[in-house]
């Protein structure tokens, strides 16, 4: 009877994750060469340490599942009777070149279509190469708040007619280009100069960061006024921060739950496991998977871990060696008996297979 190849892969995955009691030695080498990409079934999250100004209002989270709000920084004000409004914005791998999503002009200022007649306006390029005029407090200006550490850049049509500020610091325009780094919560303001002679177009906007998305949460009172706001960045893990599991001796269970997953360690100390984030499956434009094969001498499983960042188009791999259990029995012969004396026979003793498995805790949120 011919076995369906997909069923063979399924069977390998079952054995791999210890869902059966079959010994590892019984697995065919061709099955061990298959890839088993099991998505993570638990929620894991870690508050990022990249944002120096992170607090209960602005912070970033690396997460491989749905966020657990109870374990994240909480508002420090009473919000018992407030209404919570939540919005989510996809950063689309920083591919956007327009004021849109989180940076859509209508979220930050009054907007209108450009006037047909001559009028001094600050015009921002939105999606589909459309321009809108913006106004804040009676001025042709707009201010944005950075959601996390990142670089904002854009082009201007008339540098002499425009002013850009990062907080109270003026940002200089070089060759019609503006580029500046902002921390979480810092404000960028764009406005027409007082001596502007005509309208100014601002286009090719780009926000470069490690974020795959942004979540905003607003608590509004009975008068629909914002009492408190949170801006949470969904951060992709940096490949440089990933630690791969080490070589380990195994028994019949070779699942990563026993042998170890790739992790991010917040403090860099692998001995402390309460600040480690397990990485597996697909999340935030990152994919973590592994492929097993049997070594030529049949003594090891060579597990190749692969981490792929789809946004940066980067891939990192490392091989983890799993040492297979070796059957070892010692044959002994009873010594010849001497007349008149008793010569007890010692029993042969097989050394116990011992080893340390790299294991990390599966849930952690670091407070600020």
Image: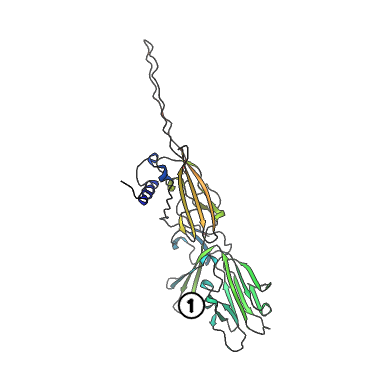
In-image side of 5 versus 243 (left or right) = left
Q: In terms of depth relative to the viewer, which is nearer, 81 or 95? A: 95
Residue drawn at x 69%, y 79% is: 160
Question: Is 134 on the left-hand or right-hand side of 82?
Answer: right
Task: Name the image quarter holding residue 342.
Answer: top left
Corner quadrant of residue 324 = top left
Query: Extreme front residue here?
Result: 2
Instruction: Please state which of residues 57 and 336 is positioned toward the viewer in this rendering.
Output: 336
Q: Residue furthest left?
A: 1
**Which residue of the protein is positioned furthest toward the top in this rendering?**
339
Residue located 41% across and 44% down the image: 30
Model colouring: rainbow
Q: Is residue 83 above or below residue 331?
A: below
Q: Position of residue 269 (x, y in %)?
A: 55, 49
Residue 339 appears in which quarter of the rendering?
Answer: top left
Q: Secondary structure at mark 1?
A: loop
Q: Indicate the position of residue 91 as horizontal and vertical percent values.
A: 51, 67
> For mark 1, does the 10 Å Cα neighbourhood hold few (<14), some (14 to 19), or many (20 or more) residues?
few
Taking 198 as reference, is 366 left or right? Answer: left
**Residue at screen point 38% across, 12% down:** 341
Q: Position of residue 159 (x, y in %)?
A: 67, 77
Count of labels shown? 1
Taking 107 as reference, is 51 above or below it? above
- Residue identified by numbered label 1: 225
The residue nearer to you, when weighing 56 against 324, is 324
Q: Position of residue 314 (x, y in %)?
A: 55, 57
């Amino acid at each position: 009877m011919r076995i369906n190849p997909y069923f063979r892969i399924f069977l390998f995955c079952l054995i791999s994750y210890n869902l059966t009691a079959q010994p590892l030695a019984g697995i065919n080498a061709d099955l061990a060469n298959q890839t088993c990409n099991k998505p993570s079934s638990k929620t894991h999250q870690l508050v990022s340490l990249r944002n120096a100004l992170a607090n209960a209002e602005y912070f970033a989270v690396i997460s491989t599942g749905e966020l657990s709000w109870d374990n994240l920084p909480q508002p420090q004000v009473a919000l018992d009777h407030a209404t919570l409004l939540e919005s989510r914005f996809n950063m689309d791998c920083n591919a956007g070149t327009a004021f849109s999503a989180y940076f859509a002009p209508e979220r930050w200022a009054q907007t209108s279509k450009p006037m047909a007649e001559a009028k001094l306006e600050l015009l921002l390029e939105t999606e589909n190469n459309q321009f809108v005029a913006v106004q804040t407090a009676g001025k042709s200006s707009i201010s944005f708040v950075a959601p996390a550490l990142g670089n904002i850049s854009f082009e201007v049509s008339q540098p002499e007619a425009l002013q850009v500020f990062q907080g109270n610091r003026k940002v200089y325009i070089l060759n019609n280009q503006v580029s500046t780094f902002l921390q979480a919560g810092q404000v960028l303001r764009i406005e027409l100069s007082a001596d502007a002679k005509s309208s100014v177009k601002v286009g090719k906007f780009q926000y470069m960061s490690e974020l795959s998305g942004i979540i905003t949460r607003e608590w509004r009172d009975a008068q629909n006024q914002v009492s408190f706001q949170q801006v949470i960045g969904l951060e992709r893990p940096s490949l440089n921060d990933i630690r791969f599991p080490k070589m380990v001796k195994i028994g019949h269970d070779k699942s990563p739950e026993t042998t170890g997953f790739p992790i991010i360690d917040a403090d860099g100390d692998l001995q402390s496991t309460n600040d480690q984030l397990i990485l597996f499956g697909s999340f935030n434009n990152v994919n973590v998977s592994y492929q097993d094969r049997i070594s030529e001498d049949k003594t090891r499983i060579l597990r190749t871990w692969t981490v792929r960042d789809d946004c940066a188009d980067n891939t990192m791999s490392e091989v983890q060696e799993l040492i297979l259990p070796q059957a070892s029995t010692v044959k002994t012969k009873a010594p010849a008996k001497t007349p008149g004396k008793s010569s007890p026979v010692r029993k042969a003793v097989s050394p116990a297979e011992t080893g340390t498995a790299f294991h990390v805790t599966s849930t952690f949120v670091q407070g600020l």
